[in-house]
Image: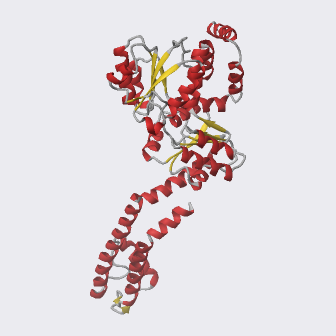
Amino acid sequence: MQKVIYLLLRRMRLPLIVLVSTYAISIVGMTLIPGVDDQGNPWRMDFFHAFYFVSFLGSTIGFGEIPYPFTAAQRLWTTIIIYAAVVSWLYAIGSILTLIQDQSFRRVLARSALARKVRRLQEPFHIICGYGDAGSWLVRELNDRGMQCVVIDIDQDKILDLDVEDLVYPVPGLHADATEAASLLTAGLKLPNCIGVIALTGSDACNLTIAITSKLLAPGLPVICQSDSADMAANMSSFGTDHIVDPFEIFGIRFAMMFHSPSMYLVYEWMTGVHNAPLSDFRNPPHGNWIMCGYGRFGKAVRKHLAVEGVNTRIIEADTRRTDAPEGSIEGRGTEAGTLLLAGVKSVNGIIAGTDNDTNNLSMLITAKNLNPDLFTVIRQNHRANDSIFQAAQPDLIMQPGTITAQYILNLILAPLLDDFLRLAHDCDDTWANILVSRVAGV
């Protein structure tokens, strides 16, 4: 609030000086110019009557000449006062309107309003930095469960989306850079009912900065970060980040589990699925040879875990040198039939379209299915806004980084021991998993 008052006084300083000066000169003038009373005797207006007269005259109310009819000199000065007051007020009102439209002033107002909202929160809340695919999904799931959160995003449009979102409870949103300490403090980092910080900005560097800032300003507060890079994840963990979420690594582990034990994969899906969502169906992808389109961070993670299960992958990569693709990789985008035929699409068992471009992934999928309709298809969907298009393509498995990240974090918040249970379940044999699946399906 102090910043709002300071900015208001600084921007309105000159208009206020002009307005006060106009009124002061007008009042002094009315006291100096001689008039005549009702008896014809010389008379001068005192300061009280001069102040009263200028006050209603300057606001264009105009009660008349008081307490006696004016002389010509007084009427001339009154005319000057009228025009001077109108111009001064127009200047002041115009300055106020300009100030209201000023982006910096509106930003300060928004920060001040959000700080008041956060201070009024009675229930525990999380600070969620980033309102992208993962952040918006997580906010909705927490909101449906009656759990409060505060959102920070550098994109004004995303904060506007949050304001119009059909949520059960209102969620405060701040348009600011979450890497700045002032933004985190405004969002309530040091308040006693803040129970955690979740960094989902989409940038590993920004998430790292948020984690460091949070740990320095609030050492005892749990911090959860998304990271797609092993090096950045190691950096985050070195100073005590509580949980680091890598959606590519998570998917690679679970996808490899479909080959190792489909029933165990089904246990994972059911235990980590969305609240009130229908249970996933049993899926058993074929072993053998697969085509991997894209050898970035996602492709490397999936290929590493598939190799453990004895699944051979043939790599198609547009830039084999930059990604350090293994020997024998085919250079190309994978959207062309020629590239897929060169990789042996007609003889492989499945294909993984795993680039960071949704359009290219859909093109790969459609082209591959035209060449080999029996393929088991896995596709990476980078943006949740394309849900309807990806569902229409009817792949066997869709990988959404944002959804995987948000689901994992939601499970950390709601069921902290679930990760330990799934880790222990992974060591159990397929018979145990089959019995568990049959029991759950019978409920």
Q: Nearer the viewer, residue 272 or 264?
A: 264
Tell me residue 41's x, y (percent).
36, 93
Q: Quadrant of the C terminus?
A: top right
Q: Is residue 41 left or right of residue 219?
A: left
Q: Is residue 414 left or right of residue 228?
A: right
Can you see residue 12?
Answer: yes
Tell me residue 180's x, y (percent).
56, 54
Q: Give the answer, above or below, for where 136 lies relative to 105.
A: above
Q: Nearer the viewer, residue 249 or 102?
A: 249
Name the residue rendered at 54%, 39% in the picture: 170
Q: Give the answer, above or below, for where 283 lies relative to 58.
A: above
Q: Nearer the viewer, residue 52 or 41?
A: 52
Q: Nearer the viewer, residue 151 or 298?
A: 298
Tell me residue 183's x, y (percent).
56, 53
Q: How is the image coloured?
A: secondary structure
Name the residue rendered at 69%, 24% in the picture: 423
Based on the displayed image, in which of its 4 quarters is residue 121 positioned?
top right
Name the residue rendered at 58%, 34% in the picture: 246
Can you see residue 275?
Answer: no
Q: What is the residue that sits farthest to the bottom in this orientation?
A: 42
Q: Quadrant of the N terminus?
A: bottom right
Based on the displayed image, in which of its 4 quarters is residue 439 positioned?
top right
Tell me residue 63's x, y (percent).
35, 72
